[in-house]
């Protein structure tokens, strides 16, 4: 009985400590690594789009993670902490349009391609989702501006890391614009058929 009580107390203590570890301070290196990860996802989307048979569902899915990572960085700048849960991050975004469009609508589309049993060659459905991305491209630009405008609010970043982050954000803007241009060309191509 005594042993069982110890195990229960140990489990309760572990659970209590684990619930306190939901948020963490992010180092400059970790912050830049998150930006690099988002940049890699954008580059991957361009790569997939250039393949002989583009997998539009994978582009939608990876773009969700780009936009989520940017939202996460905005929250880190505002609060100093990293919140891992998607719902928590989206709720902490002050721009409710970004929260709704990316955090709710795009997340549904990502889940559809990642988890649902869908017909992969249903180009009409995929095209509608691509149009959704293109129609909301300005929200990406808003996220980039928010990060740039709040970099100095993050006490864990240095002047050197701020400069590196700004360069990465600029690179991401160029890659995103290239991707949007290619997606727009796809929309025009299928509209002619």
Image (cartoon, rainbow, N blue to C red):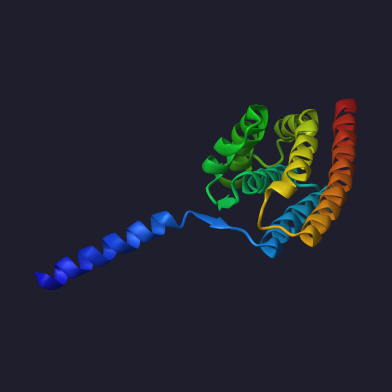
Q: Is residue 17 left or right of residue 109?
A: left
Where residue 114 sits: x, y (%)?
60, 47
Q: Nearer the viewer, residue 57 or 172?
A: 172
Judge whether 31 appears above or below 178 on screen: below
Q: Residue at x 80, y 32 (%)?
A: 138
The image quarter in which residue 35 lies: bottom right
The image shows residue 103 at horizontal and vertical percentages of: 61, 36
Residue at x-position 74% and y-position 39% = 146
Q: Relative to residue 48, is residue 93 depicted above or below?
A: above
Q: What residue appears at the point 59 percent right and 46 percent down from the top-left corner?
A: 79
In the rendering, at what x and y percent does residue 113 appear?
63, 43
Can you see residue 133? Answer: yes
From the image, which quarter does the C terminus lie in? top right
- Which residue is at the far bottom? 3
**Closer-to-camera residue (179/158):** 158
In the rendered image, residue 68, in percent from the top left (x then y), is placed at 65, 44
Relative horizontal placement of residue 127, taking residue 77 as reference (left or right): right
Q: Quadrant of residue 179?
A: top right
Tell me the quarter of the image containing the N terminus: bottom left
């Amino acid at each position: 009985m005594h042993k069982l009580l110890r195990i229960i107390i140990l489990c309760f203590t572990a659970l209590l400590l684990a619930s306190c570890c939901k948020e963490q301070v992010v180092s400059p290196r970790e912050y830049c690594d998150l930006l690099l990860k988002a940049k890699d996802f954008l580059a991957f989307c361009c790569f997939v789009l250039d393949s002989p048979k583009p997998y539009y569902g994978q582009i939608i899915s990876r773009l969700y993670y780009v936009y989520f990572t940017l939202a996460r960085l905005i929250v880190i700048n505002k609060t100093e902490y990293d919140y891992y849960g998607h719902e928590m991050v989206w709720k902490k975004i002050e721009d409710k349009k970004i929260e709704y469009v990316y955090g709710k609508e795009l997340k549904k589309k990502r889940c559809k391609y990642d988890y649902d049993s869908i017909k992969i060659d249903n180009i009409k459905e995929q095209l509608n989702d691509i149009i959704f991305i293109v129609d909301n491209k300005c929200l990406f630009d808003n996220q980039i501006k928010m990060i740039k405008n709040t970099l100095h609010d993050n006490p864990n970043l240095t002047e050197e890391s701020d400069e590196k982050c700004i360069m990465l954000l600029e690179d991401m803007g160029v890659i995103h614009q290239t991707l949007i241009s290619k997606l727009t060309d796809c929309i025009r191509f299928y509209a002619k058929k």
